[in-house]
Image (spheres, rainbow, N blue to C red):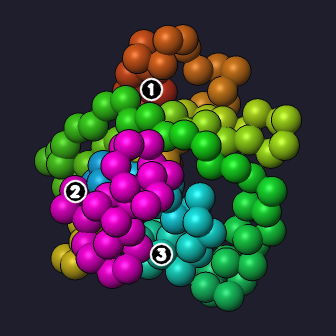
Amino acid sequence: MTTCPCGSGRPDAGCCAPYLAGAEPPDAATLMRSRFTAYARGDWAYLWRTLHHDHVDRTQSFAGWSAAIAEHGAGLQFRKLMVIATAGPDAQGLAHVLFHADVRAGRSNRSFAEHSRFRHDGVGWRYLDGVTLDDREVPRPLAALTFDTFGHAAWR
Ligand SMILES: [Zn+2]
């Protein structure tokens, strides 16, 4: 039995594994967790499938995108996920998730916080876009992080 990489503390068979195998996550926060697990497992096909068709990366082909992400992800350890806050869906149909991801590349700290936005595409929740904060800019303790930390000026 393997503990799920998303940090839920549950065995992966009762957590993210069914989603990676094809089930639809019931809400945006569950999708977000399963995408972290997909990063940890190198499941690029799942990350692509759960990317909203309006996400900027969707202008690329899966082959080109997955080659780039595999190269970028090589050597990264996705160690821990903390979902700090969720909100929505709002009047625009957007669900919001605030999280901190503990990511290392050897001894180098690649951790970050993100305010992610998700939209349902009629089939399931999909990752639309996000604004990140480098770990050095993230307030401590992590529970002090709020959606307001990010402001909204960064949205295109
Ligand atoms: Zn999980």
The residue under the point 84% across, 43% down is 106
Question: What's the amino acid at mark 1?
Answer: Gly
Q: How far across and down, in percent of the image, does residue 81 sit?
A: 49, 40
The residue under the point 61% across, 85% down is 62
Question: What's the amino acid at mark 2?
Answer: Asp
Q: CA distance from mark 2 to mark 1?
A: 24 Å
Q: Label 2's element?
A: loop
Residue 35, above or below 139: below
Neighbours of disc 2 within 10 Å: few (<14), some (14-19), many (20+)? some
Highlighted magenta segment, given as a residue range: 1-27
**In front here: 19 or 99?**
19
| Residue to which mark 1 is pinned | 151
Instruction: Check if residue 2 falls in the magenta segment.
Output: yes
Nearest to N terminus: mark 2 or mark 1: 2
Question: What's the amino acid at mark 3?
Answer: Tyr
Left or right: residue 143 compared with residue 139: left
Viewer can see residue 127: no
**In front here: 4 or 99?**
4
The residue under the point 58% across, 75% down is 44
Residue 27 circle label: 2
| Residue to which mark 3 is pinned | 46
Q: CA distance from mark 3 to mark 1?
A: 30 Å
Left or right: residue 110 compared with residue 140: right
Q: Quadrant of residue 50?
A: bottom left
Q: Label 3's element?
A: helix
Nearest to N terminus: mark 3 or mark 2: 2
Instruction: Check if residue 7 falls in the magenta segment.
Output: yes
Residue 58, above or below 114: below
Q: Quadrant of the N terminus?
A: bottom left
Q: Label 1's element?
A: loop
